[in-house]
């Protein structure tokens, strides 16, 4: 008898589903209400099948399907089975989540909205059942059971209590009334929204769009004499600057020096760009990479180092060939084979010359300060020669060799592909997937069991596979050496059912005795694990697939079939022979080609390989001994895991576009030399030309050159091979050059952590192998960009953001149009449209390049993921506007005749505000310097943001307004000092910000007067970056005084906010603990009055008797208490009424929260994070209630 392990909890829907399905089973299983033994299964429900060697099914759907199928409750035919499965999916993915949300409401959404979602799903169910009694067919099926179980919780605990049942208690009625009230409000709100849609819309004020319309030839300097526009506009600010920077040569390492070899005491900084694909267009990953790299490059350049950021573009073998092949078919109905190799390559070059520099224009739009004169393309002659030389040297040394092994094969592309081009699609159960070349979807996610007959007996061995068609290439069955069930079969053979092949039963440790029957089919030519078993046991390797995915080396009727058509045919043939056992759901990972979306096949092919063992050890050692630093260091584990367990690298690609392998197969026209085979490396020579290869071959085989015939390998090299030598091939290696001598090795490699192995490791290995030097000293790996919800960027989710859309803005309709133009199928397009509508209901506003760059850097904490919120980028555009207005105000304050001192220094007469802001500026400079040194970009952005927004604009500019308005001689003197301080803050602050926001800082910097006349024509991007030595840090006493002033100001502002004194100025009495504190208040009274918007400031020493009645009270520090006069300024009765209502609302919220937290099952069912959030919310409400009670009491005293 079968045994079913389930939960005893009456509301565990995962156990209810199989329990009910079991009722229809002709032989119901034994029910056990406890966890199964650990060796059987790890979770419930679990079904242990009797008489099948202990086969175990787990998971509610799999167990239920098995039981329901036994009772004929899964449909009468294939169509009904499919419908039942769809309803099972509906119950699990649509109904169950909203049912749980309604029954166990958390803080994620209001209850009435969750209820609305449930009713929406139930409505879809109702519409199906209008004319039907059952969901599928004419009787109860697993579909009806699954939907009923999924809906049980809300009907039992929510809906039934709302609409039926025994007389309700007073608390229940009260609760229902609250829910009805909320639902009514929700409906009223929806009706109001509909009415608003019908009414004529008043035009919403958009962000200012101002354009730069002054004729400026490309490369000429932008007009900076015209007045600045009233507000910041990215279109105005970003116009004309880039072409001027480029023409002036600011981005070249030669700028400001005779040549790059000129000694520079500041040092050299060199970084090469991760070359984007020539087919590519900018995405947020590029934007993040380039924002970080450009900030670093600009910082090093401003520090006076000889700085080079070298651009380049990758030929992207597979991607480019696919693009051009599609273009050929679309425009001329031709394949590449119709053109021939030479003509096709000409077509690719033509496409590259027309379209290939698009991404360069996009990089310029981002403000990337690359030296474009040094731009390289991996198929350029210079780089192609380096690739050829690298292959030949490594081949001659034996590091590159020829071998026949399993590769990732794409039948659609007819090429091997690299691991990074294989997407691993995870499946939880049986799933139908589209496959190129097949009209119908193909089944995956199932495990098929069948038997092999043991030769000379009636005994059979049952094996299982997810790829049943590969059994045609089986050459053995493997079992574990310690498996007692199969010891008697040592030396025995099994017979293949479709041919006369006899296959040994081999004993191998790799077999898991506890999985399935403990017997495994072995297909050495089509599975990576089986390949190794085949090597160990010297099994035959039978390749059953050709390059197009058609079956070869198999008996009729399978010969010539397409691989997935053969899947069905083999299954049926096994059933006809009685050797089919079962098919069941099986979680699995399906390898999918990222380029063609084809299912990747392991295929035996003769290819070129790089022996990575010694190079991998060297790459690990240089990190272990500190020669190469990887930042952040949590990536070290991944690095060592890869390098210490590295496999040889397949570098052959069956393409036409790329670096053709400079290797030649040798045929010797001499009877004394036997003919060679393709896989025999002895018959392959490499050469820089065919003549060189012929000479090598003649020498090797000791014959004259005229007896040598050569055939060059048709394949090209893996794109990562040319990328691996990029850091030195761009400088002309192997030819000596000034650039190679000065800039190699480089300083830094900055890229995403997702290509740590595919690119970074290979650059390190090949750099050490070919040059004897590391290609760079440090590797900084940034995080992966995700959307605001933390989801991976995916076209099908509609959450992929084009950075140019953020820079220039785009409407929701524009976003939808991009989906329509994509290759998504209609269902995915609709899903993506909904995602866009949810995330960007009004489209994406124009944010500008500077705001995008700043936001990306602000997000770049040294972790793995960045959840990017477009609203935060918009916030940084507002920061640009604040910056703009501050500089405009400051320039008016400085006046036309203002002349800055030649050097930023203290004169000794600065006010405390002056000394304090210079101290904060010095601190910001120090934080930025340490932040750049440590690649801590959030620390840099925070320091700059806080200085400009909170310290300069909010405090200093406000506090000095009274000083600047004084007309007496002493006041004028103080105002002049104040202007010098203000100028220092602007000039240094803009230079601090320049690497992150190059456009707006250039625009504003050009309007400022210079300290030295000879600097008047220079750009901010080549002025020195601020150092702490140039900004005098104020005395600690002035900082302490200002800290005291700000603590008082913040307390007054807080009181004003509490009592809603937005415009009204009130008298403020500051009760001081001693005369020294009172003297401090007296000294800085004007600053306190100005910054706190007070009517007057009165220092008081002594008790409360000296302070008038009618004040609100708050403690500013241990030395000062604030008394804010309210009497006569506000309507006391009205305020008490408002606060009483607020008090009632808070008490209701607290009562509801306490009720929720007091439930018996709260701690068991509610996630810990939600419990913590609930506790924090309750604490906040308690604090707020205490404040409200104090305010009511205070007001009543005044009354």
Image (cartoon, rainbow, N blue to C red):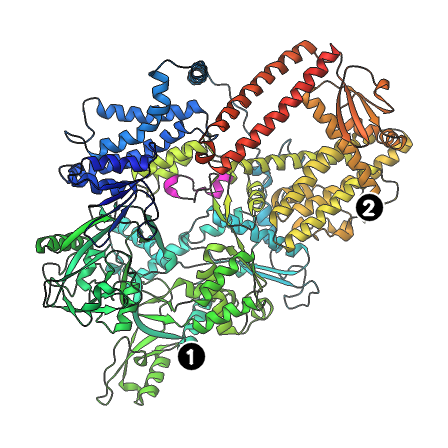
Q: Which residue was labeled with disc 1?
A: 397
The span shown in magenta is: 789-806
Per the image, label 1 sits on a secondary structure element best described as loop
Position of 184 with respect to 828 (left or right) is right
Q: Is residue 798 magenta?
A: yes
Is residue 233 in sight in this rendering? no
Q: Does the magenta stretch include residue 1181?
A: no
Residue nearest the observer in this picture, 418 or 463 = 463
Q: In which quarter of the image is residue 185?
A: top left
Provide the major secondary structure of the magenta segment: loop
For residue 337, above or below residue 387:
above
**Image location (x, y in percent) of residue 1136:** 66, 12
Q: How many marks?
A: 2
Q: Which residue was labeled with disc 2?
A: 901
Question: Earlier along the polypeptide chain: callout 2 or callout 1?
Answer: 1
* Neighbours of disc 1 within 10 Å: few (<14), some (14-19), many (20+): few
For residue 731, above or below residue 831:
below
Is residue 137 in sight in this rendering? yes
Per the image, label 2 sits on a secondary structure element best described as loop
Q: Distance between the residues labelled 2 and 1?
A: 66 Å
Picture residue at 48% right of the left edge, 46% below the top: 785
**Image location (x, y in percent) of residue 1189:** 66, 18
Q: Quadrant of residue 296?
A: bottom right
């Amino acid at each position: 008898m079968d045994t079913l392990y389930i939960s005893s909890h009456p509301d565990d829907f995962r156990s209810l589903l199989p329990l009910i399905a079991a009722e229809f089973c002709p032989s119901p299983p034994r029910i056990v209400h406890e966890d199964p033994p650990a060796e059987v299964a790890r979770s419930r429900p679990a079904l242990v099948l009797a008489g099948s060697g202990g086969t175990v099914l787990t998971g509610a759907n799999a167990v239920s399907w098995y039981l329901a199928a036994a009772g004929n409750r899964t449909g009468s035919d294939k169509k009904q089975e499919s419908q039942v499965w769809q309803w099972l999916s509906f119950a699990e993915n649509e109904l169950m989540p909203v049912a749980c949300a309604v029954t166990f409401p958390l803080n994620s959404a209001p209850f009435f909205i969750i209820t609305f979602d449930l009713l929406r799903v139930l409505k879809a169910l109702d519409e199906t059942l209008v004319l039907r009694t059952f969901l599928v067919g004419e009787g109860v099926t697993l579909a009806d059971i699954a939907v009923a179980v999924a809906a049980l919780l809300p009907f039992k605990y929510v809906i039934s209590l709302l609409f039926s049942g025994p007389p309700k208690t007073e608390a229940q009625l009260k609760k229902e009334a609250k829910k009805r009230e909320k639902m009514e409000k929700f409906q009223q709100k929806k009706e109001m929204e509909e009415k608003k849609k019908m009414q004529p819309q008043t035009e919403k004020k958009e962000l200012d769009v101002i354009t730069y319309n002054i004729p400026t030839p490309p490369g000429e300097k932008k007009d900076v004499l015209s007045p600045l526009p009233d507000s910041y506009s990215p279109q105005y600010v970003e116009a004309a600057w880039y072409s001027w920077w480029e023409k002036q040569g600011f981005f070249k390492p030669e700028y400001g020096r005779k040549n790059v070899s000129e000694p520079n005491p500041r040092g050299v900084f060199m970084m090469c760009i991760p070359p984007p694909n020539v087919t590519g267009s900018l995405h947020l990953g590029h934007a993040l990479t380039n924002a970080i790299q450009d900030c670093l490059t600009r910082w090093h350049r401003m520090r006076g180092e000889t700085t080079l950021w070298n651009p380049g573009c990758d030929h992207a073998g597979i991607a480019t060939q696919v693009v051009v092949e599609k273009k050929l078919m679309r425009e001329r109905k031709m394949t590449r084979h119709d053109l021939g190799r030479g003509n096709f390559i000409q077509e690719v070059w033509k496409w590259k010359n027309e379209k290939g520099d698009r991404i360069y224009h996009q990089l310029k739009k981002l403000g990337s300060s690359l030296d474009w004169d040094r731009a390289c393309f991996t198929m350029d002659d210079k780089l192609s020669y380096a690739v050829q030389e690298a292959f030949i040297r490594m081949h001659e040394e034996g590091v590159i060799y020829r071998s026949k092994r399993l590769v990732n094969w794409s039948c659609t592309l007819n090429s091997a592909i690299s691991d990074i081009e294989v997407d691993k699609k995870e499946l939880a159960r049986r799933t139908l997937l589209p496959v190129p070349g097949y009209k119908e979807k193909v089944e995956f996610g199932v495990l098929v069991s069948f038997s092999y007959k043991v030769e000379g007996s009636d005994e059979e061995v049952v094996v299982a596979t997810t790829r049943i068609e590969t059994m045609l290439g089986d050459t053995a069955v493997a079992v574990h050496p310690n498996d007692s069930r199969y010891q008697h079969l040592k030396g025995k053979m099994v017979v293949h059912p479709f041919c006369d092949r006899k296959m040994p039963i081999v004993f191998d440790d790799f077999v898991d005795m506890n999985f399935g029957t403990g017997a495994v089919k072995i297909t050495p030519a089509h599975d990576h694990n089986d390949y190794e078993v085949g090597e160990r046991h010297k099994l035959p390797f039978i390749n059953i697939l050709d390059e197009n995915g058609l079956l070869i080396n198999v008996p009729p009727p399978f010969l010539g079939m397409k691989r997935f058509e053969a899947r069905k045919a083999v299954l049926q043939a096994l059933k006809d022979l009685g050797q089919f056992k079962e098919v069941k759901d099986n979680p699995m990972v399906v390898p999918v080609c990222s380029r063609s979306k084809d299912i990747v096949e392991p295929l035996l092919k003769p290819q070129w390989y790089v022996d990575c063992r010694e190079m991998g050890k060297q790459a690990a050692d240089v990190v272990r001994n500190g020669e190469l630093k990887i930042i952040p260091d949590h990536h070290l584990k991944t690095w060592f895991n890869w390098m210490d367990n590295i496999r040889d690298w397949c570098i052959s690609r069956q393409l036409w576009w790329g670096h053709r392998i400079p290797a030649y197969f040798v045929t010797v026209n001499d009877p004394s030399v036997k003919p060679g085979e393709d896989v025999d490396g002895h018959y392959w020579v490499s050469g820089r030309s065919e003549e060189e290869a012929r000479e090598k071959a003649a020498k090797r085989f000791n014959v004259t050159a005229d007896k040598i015939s050569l055939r060059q390998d048709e394949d090209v090299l893996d794109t990562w091979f040319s990328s691996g030598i990029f850091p030195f091939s761009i400088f002309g290696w192997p030819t000596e050059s000034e650039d190679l001598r000065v800039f190699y090795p480089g300083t830094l490699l900055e890229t995403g952590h997702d290509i740590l192995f595919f690119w970074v490791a290979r650059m390190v290995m090949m750099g050490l192998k070919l040059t004897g030097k590391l290609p760079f000293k440090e590797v900084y790996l940034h995080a992966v960009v995700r959307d605001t919800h933390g989801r991976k960027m995916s076209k099908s989710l509609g959450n992929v953001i084009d950075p140019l859309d953020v820079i220039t803005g785009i409407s929701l309709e524009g976003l939808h149009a991009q989906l329509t133009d994509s290759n998504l199928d209609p269902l995915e397009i609709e899903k993506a449209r909904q995602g866009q509508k949810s995330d960007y209901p009004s489209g994406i506003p124009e944010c500008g390049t500077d705001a995008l760059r700043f936001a990306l850097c602000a997000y770049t904490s040294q972790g793995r993921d960045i959840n990017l919120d477009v609203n935060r980028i918009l916030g940084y555009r507002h920061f640009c506007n604040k910056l703009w207005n501050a500089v405009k105000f400051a320039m008016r304050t400085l006046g036309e005749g203002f002349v800055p001192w030649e050097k930023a220094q203290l004169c000794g007469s600065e006010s405390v505000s002056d000394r304090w802001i210079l101290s904060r500026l010095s601190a910001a400079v120090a934080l930025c310097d340490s932040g750049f040194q440590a690649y801590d970009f959030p620390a840099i952005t925070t320091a700059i943001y806080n200085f400009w927004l909170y310290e300069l604009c909010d405090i200093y500019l406000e506090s000095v307004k009274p000083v600047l308005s004084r007309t007496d001689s002493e006041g004028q003197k103080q105002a002049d000092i104040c202007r010098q301080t203000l100028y220092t803050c602007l000039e240094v602050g803009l230079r601090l910000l320049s690497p992150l926001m190059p456009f707006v800082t250039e625009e504003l910097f050009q309007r400022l007067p210079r300290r030295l006349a000879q600097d008047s024509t220079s750009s901010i991007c080549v002025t020195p970056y601020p150092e702490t030595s140039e900004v005098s840090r104020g005395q600690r006493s002035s900082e302490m005084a200002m800290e005291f002033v700000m603590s008082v100001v913040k307390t007054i502002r807080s009181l004003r906010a509490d009592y809603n004194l937005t415009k009204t100025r009130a008298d403020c009495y500051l009760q001081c603990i001693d005369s020294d504190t009172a003297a401090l208040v007296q000294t800085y009274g004007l600053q306190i009055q100005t910054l706190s918007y007070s009517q007057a400031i009165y220092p008081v020493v002594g008790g409360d008797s000296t302070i008038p009645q009618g004040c609100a009270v708050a403690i500013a520090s241990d030395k000062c208490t604030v008394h804010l006069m309210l009497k006569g300024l506000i309507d006391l009765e009205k305020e008490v009424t408002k606060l009483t209502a607020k008090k009632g609302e808070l008490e209701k919220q607290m009562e509801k929260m306490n009720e929720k937290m007091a439930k018996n099952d709260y701690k068991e069912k509610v996630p810990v994070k939600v419990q913590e959030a609930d506790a924090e919310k309750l604490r906040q409400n308690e604090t707020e209630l205490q404040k409200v009670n104090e305010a009511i009491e205070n007001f009543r005293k005044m009354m």
